[in-house]
Amino acid sequence: MTSPRVVELRKNVMNRHDRKAALLRRYFESTETCVINLVSSPGTGKTELLTEVLRSMVGRGISAAALVGDCATDNDAKRLEASGAPVRQIVTEGLCHLEVTMIDQHVQGWDLNGIDFLFIENVGNLVCPSAFDLGETLRVVLLSVTEGEDKPLKYPQMFNSADLALITKMDLSEPCEFDLATTQDNIETVSPGITILETSARHPNSVNALVDHLIESRVKLLETTSPETTSPETTSPETTSPETTSPETTSPETLSTA
Amino acid sequence: MHELSIANNIISEVEAAARANNVQSVASVTLSIGRLCGIVPGALQFGFEIAREGTVLSSAKLLIEEESVVVWCPDGDHSVELMDMVFRCPVHGCQTPEILSGKGMEILRFEVADSCSNSQETIAS
Ligand SMILES: Nc1nc2c(ncn2[C@@H]2O[C@H](COP(=O)(O)OP(=O)(O)OP(=O)(O)O)[C@@H](O)[C@H]2O)c(=O)[nH]1
Ligand SMILES: [Mg+2]
């Protein structure tokens, strides 16, 4: 006789997950570490480009580190280590994406104070990682010139959720008859206003331009970080490796205004 | 197949709420999923059927409501629903970076499988 009992829940499916991601983001803010989640299809060139970015950062005296997710091997971790930066590996055992609990586990006991950039190479997959917040500061999506100009339209969620798009393997654009304008247009279609940079792991200038862009982004983000998340102990200028490069972008004065 | 991870999250959220409400068995769960989440409903159903085994949801149905993508049109000062993933106002043609809905993934409610439970006074979320 009684109508079936219904419990109104109104709860975000990713509740626990997103809460953990928010906590981790607060932690990364407190250590002033810019955490960059790299996402793309398999083979787009995440490891190749990241190795060069790390090498460039190490060369400029910027402290950077990487966490790499891989379904089965440690190949990528070994390649990244050649840059001289500290690298940790996450074996996902077949899982198609990284989740925040894995990031949490792997940053345990890692003193991120003084690490300006922590890169996370996600599992090669243009679909699954888009739904999973890792607590990252920036999500960067990569698309290579060999994949076809239409990929942003086919994977709109991933491109839409990203903060920066990189078109990789630009050194191969001619033999691939790559249409840059159409690709840029397609990215803009699914993610209006996103910054798009062209890169090649074989062209040091493009790697340096990307590094400059990331340094600038980090400084801007530190300026906008809400003051309550940055207690005095964690924002003292000494913890922000003052020996780093260009004084105008990473000077203690700029950082302490956060 | 990230839908299996999503299904596991759904199950654990509903299990916790079922426990809090003294519910022994769940008949159905209703979800709202934004079209920008990149979730394939069929794959989620499949994952749900695997993940529900041995829980209070073991015979529960999964009902999925799709949440459309609604954006703000800055030129026309109005909200507008997008039928595809082209982030441009269909009326004014301008870019529409501001997303008002379509990213949510929410468990709306669940229905208790009728056995002996009766009152509503214990309902909490
Ligand atoms: N010519 C050229 N080749 C590149 C470039 N970047 C990557 N490659 C090559 O592309 C292949 C795949 O690159 P990876 O860096 O392994 O790609 P990935 O995105 O890390 O791949 P997964 O981790 O398996 O998803 C390798 O053979 C690289 O040498 C580039 O800028 N130019
Ligand atoms: Mg790789």
Image: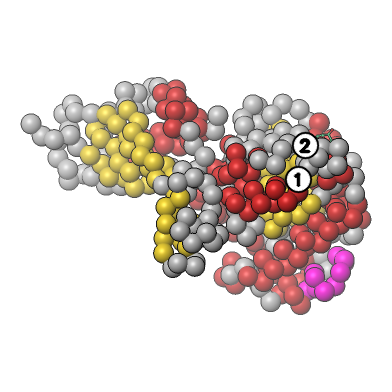
Magenta span of residues: A243-252
Picture coordinates of residue B22 (x, y %)? 25, 36
Apparent side of residue A243 relative to residue B49 in the rendered image (left or right): right
Residue B46 against residue A25 in the figure, above or below: above
Real-space Cα separation, disc 2 to disc 1, in angstroms: 11 Å
State the residue at coordinates (82%, 37%). Answer: A176
* Residue visible at 49% across and 67% down in the picture: B75
Q: Whole-percent x and y of residue B87?
A: 53, 53
Apparent side of residue A191 relative to residue A36 in the rendered image (left or right): left
Q: Say which amino acid is labelled 2.
A: Thr
Q: Mark 1 sits on what residue?
A: A179
Give the percent coordinates (x, y) of residue A207. Answer: 85, 53
Q: Is residue A45 visible?
A: no
Name which of mark 2 and mark 1 comes first in the sequence. 2
Quadrant, the C terminus of chain A:
bottom right
Quarter of the figure that contains the N terminus of chain A = top left
Q: Nearer the viewer, residue B92 or A166?
A: B92
Foreground pick, A159 / A130? A159
Check disc 1: other Cα within 10 Å, few if <14, some if 14-19, many if 20+.
few
Determine crowd level at label 2: few under 14, some 14-19, many 20+ residues with C-alpha closer than 10 A: some
Judging depth in this view, the residue of A258 and B41 nearest the camera is: B41
- Mark 2 in CB contact with mark 1 (< 8 angstroms): no
Q: Of helix, strand and loop, which one carries label 1?
A: loop
Residue identified by numbered label 2:
A146
Confirm whether the magenta stretch covers residue A245: yes
The image quadrant of residue A214 is bottom right
Residue A196 lies in quadrant: bottom right
Asked if residue A221 can be seen in this view, the reply is: yes
Query: Dot 2: what SS?
Result: loop
Please report, as a chain letter, where disc 1 is located: A
Quick check: B121 above or below B93? above
